Image (tube, helix red, strand yellow):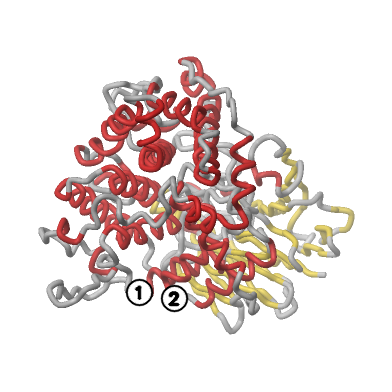
Amino acid sequence: MRKIAICIFLALLPLISLGQILRGILGSRDLSSMLVMDQKWVPYPDYSDRAGWDGLLGQYKESVISEGERYLDYQWQISKASDYLEYQRTGDRYKQEDKIRGNGKALSCLMLAELAEGKGRFMDDIMDGVFLFCEMTSWAVTAHIGFLQQSGMTLPDYRDNVLALYQGNFSQMLSWAWYFFHHEFDQLARGLSERLAYEIRRRELDPFLERDDLNWMGFLPEFSRPNNWNPWCNSNVLICFMLLENDPVRLSAALEKCIRSLDRYLDSLPADGACDEGPVYWYSSAGNLLGCLECLSLITGGRLGYSGNAFVRSFGDYIAHANIVGDWQANFSDAVPSDKVGSPTLFRFAGLSGSELLHKFALHSYHADGYNPVDANWTTFYRAMENLRACKTMGALPDNGYTPSDFAWYPVTELCFMRSGKGYLAVKGGHNHERHNHNDVGSCIYFYDGRPVLVDAGPATYNSKTFDKRYRYKMWNNSSDGHNLPNIGGFAQGYGYEFKAIGTVASRKSKKFVTDIAGAYPDSAGVESWVLDYRLLKDGSLDITETFRLHRPAPAVLHFLVPSRPDLSGPGRIGLGGGLTLRYDAKALKASFEEIPVTGTGIGWEAFGPSLFNISLSAETAPQKGSYHITIRK
């Protein structure tokens, strides 16, 4: 159970459980007396400890140095006013964002290379990068500036230091730069370390303590359902305070506020442990929650430690269930269909949660596909370094085999993953107000023999319209018409909590999923019931029966999104490639398809090739009730 009984025996117990932390139990207790001060918690060698860094980096040392050498004499990119304004003018967020993130990658790789080599060869470039960031008005990217700044300006406002995703990453990176190199800065460029500490305090530490209105914090009623921003931003805040703040009263106030904010986030999650933002955002949500828990333990010498609960274990296991095969994943919401498994993060999470399933999946993925920890986002230095250390451990452990679960059911989220024979099916009920959602109640993802058959396109490249409710669900890949769902009476599904499924059930024994999606459509569609019945057969074939009752006769179009050009040459049969055929009643339905070019759109991160194809099975008549039967098999 997620709601954990509250018992406080702080005077008797050396360890406080995660459940107690997340229920806000600390209250007015003297957290400052538990703190490990003066950065003695840092688990990495000092800059001057050559043997320490040689041992820590081990086999990766030369690769780290080579990566840093790429950025010697780097041409630092300047964000111009017109770069910021491009977001307002055309919706393009990357003209400015690519520049600042490129600078962050360069600086973080230079820092790591200097730690690895220790000869001062990279120091001038590091100081150039640090000075450049100090001179910037804001470390936030343009897409985040506009909606977080109180002025609403597209240009950064020097009076308003907002706390955001990449801004927090850069704050963490620069905090590590101060920690490792401030003595060297004092010797080589007097005043630089003082300036850097000042900028981190005014841009990250002070605003966090002073403000409660930022939406990701979860403190205001209208922001009571924060998304992955919450653990992401809190993880950066924690590390920045831990590295720069040596006033125990101020540090404990920051820790307590992070704990309260994380509590709001966890209270808002589905109690079944599913990540309703999709598997890509699992790494930002669960992955950053992991970092927060590890850091809370470090700064308190283990006294704020995790003691285990079923919810956190389920939250971790979700990412294994959502994996289909290799890098393919069940990419509901704004997740991409194929992304490299972050095996070291999974390995660390398995160690925290005690999940044997996740432990085996992490080791199997690492040994099967490899993982290069050097090719990481080093702006989030702590996470990248812990993943590197995990890789060293994983490399010494054998792959003892991993057998994925044949059935996983999340009854609150109404999300189900199942396997049978050569088939894999992911299918969802739920509602159309999930975080990063698409309007996709009742949609499915189907693989046969390790290849995609019915797919979810995933997100397109983000722009100014992506999260604007006026436009988001008019984009074909976010609409139900771009998913494996029917259009009923000319209507697609609506957005909001009220647009939801009812009567959703799933059966492990029969590999069956049934849900009524009538409520996901507006009242004007006139749908009394539309029951989707998915059955994954023993050989992996898929049967879909759609049984409906309408308030009035209306046309319907069944959509199926596929990655290869359909062959419509035979009546009642559509060739899907790989020897598979989609079969339907040609007397009731007429088949056609639309080719959708996706090259350059960001859709699928090019996993699908240049085009997707949306099959339409249109009703020849407009009955008020009836059913359609679809099968996909060899």
Image location (x, y in percent) of residue 16 = 24, 70
Query: Would you say the residues marked 1 and 2 are in contact, meaning their CB atoms lie under 8 Å apart?
Result: yes
What amino acid is labelled 2 in the image? Gly
The front one of 158 and 327 is 158
Residue 9 drawn at (x, y percent): 15, 75
Residue in the image at 24% along x and 57% along y: 36
Estimate how packed mark 1 is, as few (under 14), some (14 to 19) or many (20 or more) residues with alpha carbons within 10 Å.
some
Kind of residue at badge 1: Gly
Q: Is residue 189 left or right of residue 606?
A: left
In terms of sequence position, does the residue under pointer 1 or pointer 2 come before the other? 1
Q: Is residue 534 visible?
A: yes
- Residue furthest to the right: 569
Name the residue beneath numbered marker 1: 308
For residue 520, say whether it is visible. Answer: no
Q: Secondary structure at mark 2?
A: loop
Q: Which residue is mark 2?
A: 354
Q: Quadrant of the N terminus?
A: bottom left
Q: Secondary structure at mark 1?
A: loop
| Quadrant in the picture for residue 15 | bottom left
Q: Residue at x 81, y 52 (%)?
A: 566
Give the CA separation, mark 1 to mark 2: 8 Å
Q: Position of residue 520 (x, y in %)?
A: 48, 54
Q: Residue at x 35, y 56 (%)?
A: 292
Above or below, 105 relative to 242? above
Residue at position x 52%, y 26% from top? Answer: 91
Label 2: few (<14), some (14–19) or many (≥20) C-alpha neighbours in 10 Å: some
Looking at the image, how many numbered discs can be counted on the residues?
2
Q: Please state if 625 lies on the left or on the right of 289 as rendered.
A: right
Q: Nearer the viewer, residue 161 or 394?
A: 394
Return the x and y of residue 213 as percentages of the image width and height.
Answer: 24, 39
